[in-house]
Image (cartoon, rainbow, N blue to C red):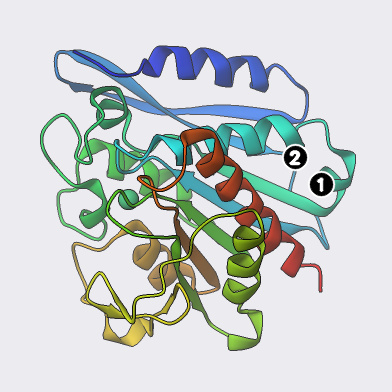
Amino acid sequence: MTLRSYDDLLKRLDRIAALPTVNLQRLGSFEAAGRTYTMVMLELGTPGPGKHSVEVAAGIHGDEPAGVEAAVSFLERNARNDEFLSTFYGVVLPCCNPSGYELGTRENADGVDLNRQFATRHPPPEVELITRALEGRCFDLVFEMHEDIDAPGLYLYEIAESPDRHVGEKIIESVQAMGCPIDLREEIEGMKAKGGLIRRKSIRFRKTRLPQAIYTYRTCGGHVITLEPPASMLPFEERVKVEVTALTVALQSLLT
Ligand SMILES: [Zn+2]
């Protein structure tokens, strides 16, 4: 029994990629749960001098579909947005765990949490395809869309090489203004938190079996944000809006 159709998602992405400003790449295929899945990555606009580059990744946990929808919505709303396209270049991995997306499970169909499989000797095919596609590419901003089913409000992780790039407070302020509750606990997921913000120092991370965000920061440095809207506190559409708004605020901060 599947909850969602990855094929339907691919059809939607193919429609977006029919626009001249979007380029869809098939990264490769793999077998899971008796069927074949093809991973895709989309480029929004083109890189160029003076443009800011952003990578958006969603759906590495299959039970966090608002992130996937937000990534698709981000593509749809900016594919015809000249202002965006003249300022930014985007790379979008809209669904990093296709089998988990269909099953509605955090893990993939083989029961593996892909978000602990970066920087491993034998990564699962999903992780292998993602890391190969991103090899040698670094971005001004990396934005990962997650959700948390247990949290009483939204929180986010932010790592930035230069603290003057921090935009977490602005994101919290903006989503709170939309009516999104904020997780004000002083400890979240075993980490120190303040006002919904978890700011980690990369130096304290282990070297293997990394989450995608930490792997990206290890590889490229820069600025990485992981957003966790509260899945039990807001309806789906609201969570999608919150994800898109947070990403927009983060992108605006690149311009100042
Ligand atoms: Zn997640």
Report whether residue 87 is seen.
Answer: yes
- The answer to whether 186 is drawn above or below residue 219 in the figure is below
Disc 1 under 8 Å from ligand 1? The reply is no
The type of residue carrying mark 1 is Phe
Q: Which residue is mark 2?
A: 45
Q: Nearer the viewer, residue 225 or 147?
A: 147
Q: Is residue 241 above or below residue 198?
A: above
Q: Position of residue 226 (x, y in %)?
A: 45, 61
| Callout 2 secondary element | loop
Q: Is residue 119 above or below residue 167?
A: above
Above or below, 214 relative to 71? below
Q: Find residue 50 and report its horizontal and vertical position in percent.
A: 83, 63
Q: Residues within 10 Å of mark 2 (few under 14, many from 20)?
A: many
Drawn side of residue 106 relative to residue 129, left or right: left
Q: Is mark 2 within 8 Å of ligand 1?
A: no
The location of residue 196, given as percent across then percent down, is: 45, 72
User: Where does the N terminus fall, quadrant-wise?
Assistant: top left
The residue drawn where x is 23% and y is 47% is: 114
Q: Does residue 139 appear anywhere in the picture?
A: no
Q: Is residue 204 left or right of residue 87?
A: left
Residue at mark 1: 84
Q: Residues within 10 Å of mark 1 (few under 14, many from 20)?
A: some
Q: Are marks 1 and 2 in contact (CB under 8 Å)?
A: yes
User: Which quadrant of the view contains residue 152?
Assistant: bottom left
* Residue type at numbered disc 2: Gly
Question: Looking at the figure, which quarter contains the C terminus?
Answer: bottom right
Task: Classify mark 1: helix, strand or loop.
Answer: helix
Task: Classify residue 76 as left or right of residue 228.
Answer: right
Residue 237 x, y percent position in the rendering: 54, 34
Q: Earlier in the sequence, mark 1 or mark 2?
A: 2
Comparing 90 with 64, the one in front is 64
